[in-house]
Amino acid sequence: MDQSTFSRPLGAEAAAMRLLSDREVAARLSRSRRDFLRDAAGVALGTTFLGSSHFLRGQTAFKKRKVVVITFGGGARDQETFAPEGQENIPYMLKELAPRSTFFTQVINNGILGHYVATASLATGVYETLNNFSAIPPEHPTVFEYFRKDLKRPPSDAWVVAPSNGFNRIGESECRSYGQGMGARVILPKHLLNAATSGSTTDYDHLLRDNYETPLYAPQIGGGEFELRQLETILKLSVDDFKAHARMASSPDELSVYIAKRLMKQESPSLLWITMHDIDIAHSGAYSLYIDAIRRTDRLCAEMWKAIESEPEYAGNTTLIILPDFGRDADQDPGGNGFQHHRTGDPASRTTWMMALGAGIKEGVICDRPLQSIDLIPSLGAMMGFSAAQSQGTPIKELR
Amino acid sequence: MLPSGLKAEKFAAYPPEARRLATANLQALQQLPLSFVPGLLRELIDYDFKFPTERDSIDRELINLRALSPKEIQSWFDEFSKLSLSSKLETFDWVNYPSQFVEQESAHLWTTHQLDSFRKAATNYGDRLRAVSPVVPLPMRRLGIAIIGQGVDKYEGQLFRNLRKHGTCFRQLNPENGLDQLLAAAAVRAKAHPVPYGHWYVDGGQPADHDPILTLVQYRALEPVRSALLTYMEKEIAHPGMGPEELRTRLARLLPSDLGMDKAGDTVLDRFQVRLFTEGSGTQIFSTAFTQWTARECLRRAQPLTLVVRYAPRQRQRPMNELLSSSHANGDLDPTESLIDGDMGGYYQWINQQRLPGSEQSSFLVWFEGHGEALAIGPSLPRGAESNSNIDLAKLLSLALS
C-alpha cells in the first residue's frame, strides 16, 4: 500500500506532530489562530470583550433580525490565512472584521470533505452523505426550511447565492415534512450569466468556471433556480446592465457578491447564504492561483460587511457569519499533496475557523473550545427564533 | 468474495510477474481482511511495470506477510478487520479491479464515518512494516535540486520562505552556467552509481542539454500525449450519464498506446508518464502542476538518488472549460505566477525527499534560475542562515553535499 512506502515522519517537527492525537493537532491549530489573532488584531481571549453590539431582544427583535452566512467552498489553511505567515493574504478579515467579531478558532467538520456535501451539511446541521457530484437535494431539512416554516416567512425572505451549477438543489431538502416549496430561492450567477448572454460568452468565459474539484463535471440544471426573467422583476436589473457588470467582475465570486448585494437592496432577505468557490482553484495545483483567490475572498468578505453596514434594511440588525466549509490537507500528510486537495481527512483538512460579527455578537472575543460545523444551524435557530429540529448539532452559546 | 475464497486462477488476467507473485503468496493473502487486500493488489497488479524500488517494497511486504503467524496476522490487521464494508463491496471484482475497489471503498468509508479509523489502521500498519524492514544503506547521499523562475527578470517577493529555517540562503551567487553545472553534476552522480531509474531530470518545458544517462521526463515532449488525453476526455464527457467516477475509472485503464506513445518505448517510464496525466490533478492544464506532481510521484515511486526538477512558465489562467479544451491547449505564459508555483513546488519536493530513507544525510538545493539567489540544505550547512558568498552553483552544490 502507499502507506507502507511513503509515510515516513518528516523530521523532528513532524515526528512530534505524529505523536499527538488528531484532537491534539486540531487544538494546536486552534491555539495558533488564537495567538496570532491576539497579537495581530488585538483580539482578547475568552469572555473578555471590547464591546458588544446592541441588539433588541424579544419577539420584535426576532422579526427584524437578519443573518448573512458566507461559506468558502474551497477551504483555506492556516498558513495561508490566520497563521503569521498567512497574514498578508487576509488584511481585511484581520484588520477590519476580526477585531469586531467573536472568533471561533476550532470548528471541526467530521463529515465528508466534498464541497457540495459539506455545504449541504452546514445548511442542514447533519453530516449529509449524498453524492458530492450529483445535483440532488439534501436528505434533511435545511436551515431555510426551518426558518420559513417556523417563522412563516415568504419565499423572498431566504436566498442562496451559489457559485457552482451543482449547488442548485441546496435550497431545500427531500424531507417530506419540509421540502418542496418551503426552501430558499437559489441564484446561480453563472447560470444567469449564461442565460443572459444566450450561451455566447466570449467576454465572460472567465466567470463561468465550474467545480474545480472535478473540473469536468457540470450537471444539468433542474429544479427551482432563479429564472432569467426574474432578473428585471426581482433584481431590477436589465440584461444589459447585468452583462456590463459581469464584464467588470474578475471572478465568479465577484459576480456572486454583486448579485448578493443586489438582492439585499431589492429583496432584503432575512436569511442570505452565499457560498464562495474561487479558492477551490487550488485543485489545479497552482499555488499562486490559490493565494490570489484567498486574497480576493478576503476582500469580498469585507465588501459584504460594508454592504451590510450601509444598507438601511441591514445596518444594525444583521449578523454576519463567515466560515470555510473545511480546511485543506497539511503539507506533511503523506496521503495528500498539501494545499492542493482535501482528501486525507487529517486534522488540517477537518479543522477550520468561524467568525461572527454584527448584531448580538460580542466584539473582540476568541473562543477556542472545539465546535462542530453542524453546530451552526441550531445556533442560527437560537438567534432567529426557529427550531432546527432534526439537526444533530448543538447551539453555540456565544451566538444568541 | 472475501480474501479467504481466493484461488490461484483468480489471478489469470494479471501480467506474468504479478501473477507469479500473487499465486506464490496466495496463502498469506487469504488470511487478510477485505478492507486491506485490494490496496495491496492495486500495487501488485502493476508489478511488471513498477520501478525497481517499488518491486523491492512489494517483495519485502509479501515476505513479511508470509512470515506472520495467524496470531500475528490478527494483531497486525485487527484494526482493518474491524472496519465494516458493504455487501456491494464484497461482491465487487476486487481481484481484477483493485483500484476501482479502493475508490469505492474510500467513498464507503467517508460515508460511514470510518475514514479516520482506516487512516489510523493504515498509518499503524505502515509504521509497523517499516520497523521490521531492513535498512539498506544508500550508495550515495540523496540529492534534490529545484530550479524555479525561468523567464522572470525580477521578483520583489521573498523566495524559499518555507525552507529558510532548514538551510542556508545565498543571495549573491554567480549564476553563470548554473543550469549546465547542475545538470553536469547530476550526470556525474549517475555515472558514479548507475542505478536504474536512480537519477532523474524533470523539465516543465523544453529541457536543456543534458547527459542521456539521466532519466528524462519533459512536459514539452509529452504535448501529443496530453493533447490526446484531453481529446479523449472531451469525447468521454459527451457520453450521456458520464460522471466523474466513471470517467476516472476509464482514465485509469488507459495505456501508453491508447495515447499514441511508441510501443517500443520504455514501458515502465511510459506508464509512469501516462499516470502523471490520468491520476494527477491539474497536470493536464498547468506545466507547474505537472512538474510538481512528477517530482512527488518520482520520489514516492522511484526513490531516486538524484532528482533535478526545473520549472517552466505555465499558461496564464483562463476559463476552466477553455483550459481543458485540446483546441486551446496553449495560451499566454505567466512566468511570475509560475515562480510562486515553483517556489511551493520546491518546498514540496524537499518534504517528499525527506520521507525517504537516508533523509538525515540528504541534500537539497533550490535556485532562482538565472539569478544569484538560492537556498541549500545539507548535513554540514547551517540552518536559518544567510550567506553573501559569491560562489557559483557547482561550488554551492559541493557545499550542500559535503
Image (cartoon, grey):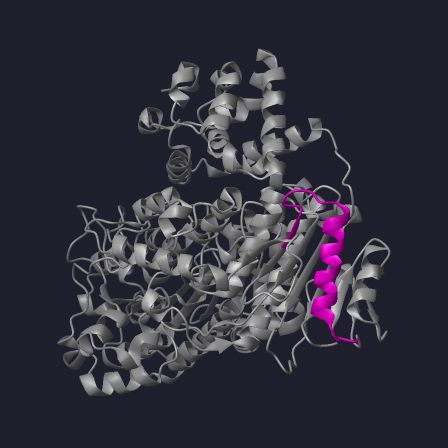
Q: Is residue A149 left or right of residue A116?
A: left
Q: Position of residue A266 (x, y in %)?
A: 23, 80
**Which range is magenta?**
B174-200
Q: Is residue A43 left or right of residue B276?
A: right
Instruction: Tell me if residue A183 comes above or below residue B386 in the rendering.
Output: above
Choose top left, top right, bottom left or bottom right for residue A242.
bottom left
Q: Is residue B182 left or right of residue A220?
A: right
Instruction: Tell me if residue B383 comes above or below residue B16 in the rendering.
Output: below
Q: Nearer the viewer, residue A297 or A8?
A: A8
Q: Outermost residue, top direction? A: B70
Which quadrant holds the C terminus of chain B?
bottom right
Tell me, yes or no, if residue B199 can be seen here: yes
Instruction: Tell me if residue A57 comes above or below residue B293 in the rendering.
Output: below
Q: Residue at x 58, y 39 (%)?
A: B51
Q: Is residue A312 left or right of residue A13?
A: left
Q: Nearer the viewer, residue B102 or A85?
A: B102
Tell me, yes or no, if residue A90 can be seen here: no
The tally of labels here is: 0
Q: Outermost residue, front direction? A: B264
Does residue B195 show up magenta in the picture? yes
Q: Position of residue A118 (x, y in %)?
A: 38, 52
Q: Residue at x 63, y 45 (%)?
A: B197
Q: Position of residue A96 (x, y in %)?
A: 53, 78
Q: Nearer the viewer, residue A260 or A328?
A: A328
Q: Residue at x 38, y 85 (%)?
A: A310
Which quadrant holds the N terminus of chain B?
top left
Does residue B287 show up magenta in the picture? no
Q: Nearer the viewer, residue A171 or A42?
A: A171
Q: Position of residue A369 (x, y in %)?
A: 56, 52
